[in-house]
Amino acid sequence: MSAGSIRIGFVASGSRRSPGTGRHFGPFHLVRIRKDRARVISVGYLRLDRGDLEPLREKGTRLNATVVGVVRLGPDVTPALAKNVFGRLRILGWRLGDKRTFDVL
């Protein structure tokens, strides 16, 4: 099963978002989630918290994310959770969140 979306233009995702998609605000946001892997490309601001990452970990889905702008990992994202979920996190810009969490990536 595959879920995906592309958003072009400034959007603020609401409460009806799939796990792994994050909260996005910016000009471009691409999400593709499959059983074993997920892909997010975001230009603007992207926030991921435990509610986004935990369902992916439970399914064994690896997340590859590229962010141009700002990425924020919520305070509830532990280094262990991040290490288990992210296959790759590329950031061209700024990162906000616990330094220890980003260090494991």
Image (spheres, rainbow, N blue to C red):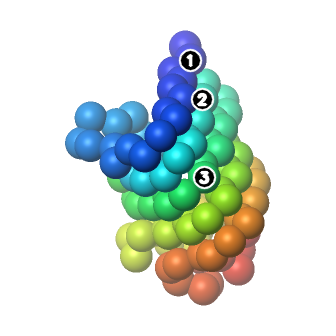
Taking the image as shown, residue 89 lies to the left or right of residue 55, namely right
Find residue 101 and report its image quarter.
bottom right
The CA distance from mark 2 to mark 1 is 7 Å
Mark sitting on residue 31: none
Name the residue furthest top: 1
Q: Nearer the viewer, residue 61 or 21?
A: 21
The amino acid marked with disc number 1 is: Ser
Q: Which numbered disc, 3 or 2, marks the residue that appears first in the sequence?
A: 2
Mark sitting on residue 32: 2
Task: Say which residue appears at 56% left-offset and 43% top-offset.
Answer: 28
Provide the secondary structure element on which disc 2 rests. strand
Q: Which numbered disc, 1 or 3, marks the residue that appears first in the sequence?
A: 1
The amino acid marked with disc number 2 is: Arg
Taking the image as shown, residue 32 lies to the left or right of residue 48, namely right
Residue 76 placed where, x, y %?
39, 71
Mark 2 surroundings within 10 Å by alpha-carbon count, few (fewer than 14), some (14 through 19), many (20 or more): some
- Residue at numbered disc 3: 43
Task: Say which residue appears at 51% left-offset and 21% top-offset.
Answer: 3
Mark 3 surroundings within 10 Å by alpha-carbon count, few (fewer than 14), some (14 through 19), many (20 or more): many
Q: Nearer the viewer, residue 48 or 77?
A: 48
Q: Which numbered disc, 2 or 1, marks the residue that appears first in the sequence?
A: 1
Taking the image as shown, residue 93 lies to the left or right of residue 101, namely right
Residue 35 placed where, x, y %?
60, 25
- Residue at numbered disc 1: 2
Q: Is residue 72 above or below residue 31?
A: below
Provide the secondary structure element on which disc 3 rests. strand
Q: Nearer the viewer, residue 35 or 8?
A: 8
Q: Quadrant of the C terminus?
A: bottom right
The CA distance from mark 1 to mark 3 is 22 Å
